[in-house]
Amino acid sequence: MAQQARTLGRRPGEWTRLGTDAAHAASAVRAAVPPQGPWHLHPLTALTPLEAAGVRIEAGDHVTLVPGPGAAAPAPYARLLLPGARAVAAEALRLLAARFPHLRPDGAPVRARRAPVTRRLVRLPALLGEEETR
């Protein structure tokens, strides 16, 4: 949701439209959330020597499997939880845009250091009209 606020906050017309058009908010959330749900990293330990993708892996080596977004099947819970999560995120974005129609970024976002795959936002400095929050 923060990433969508950041992206759409740089496009004032798009941001303003979120506050008045529920379908636009739902569309923005669908564009931001992959259909298969969040990625899952699978830390593994090789039991025998092998070669994968042209790389030699010895027994005992630690590797992390990262499924590609197109190849990954939906997480088992994703089919149940994603529709509700998308609806909540769309309504939250719509209400935020309706309350702060002049929201715009104000500084660099801060991302979680231990989330190199998702690059999760921790803080998003923004101007909320005349008010500022950091």
Image (cartoon, rainbow, N blue to C red):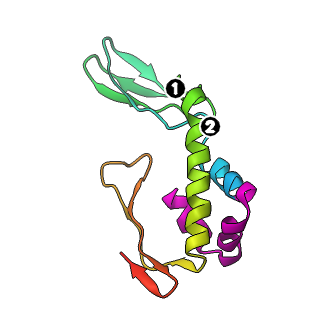
Query: Which residue is found at the position 71% from the left and 76% from the top?
Result: 13
Query: Which residue is found at the position 62% from the left and 45% from the top?
Result: 87
Query: Which stretch did the figure color magenta?
Result: 1-24
The residue nearer to you, when weighing 56 against 60, is 60
List the residue tagged with mark 1: 77
How far apart are the alpha carbons under marks 1 and 2? 11 Å
Determine whether the residue tagged by mark 1 lies in a helix, strand or loop. Answer: loop
The residue nearer to you, when weighing 98 against 39, is 98
Q: Specify whether residue 69 is in view.
A: no
- Residue at the bottom extreme, as displayed: 130
- Residue at the left extreme, as displayed: 60
List the residue tagged with mark 2: 83
Q: Earlier in the sequence, mark 1 or mark 2?
A: 1
Crowding around mark 1 (Cα neighbors within 10 Å: few <14, some 14 to 19, many 20+) is few
Q: Is residue 7 on the magenta stretch?
A: yes
Query: Which residue is found at the position 60% from the left and 27% from the top?
Result: 79
Q: Is residue 127 on the magenta stretch?
A: no
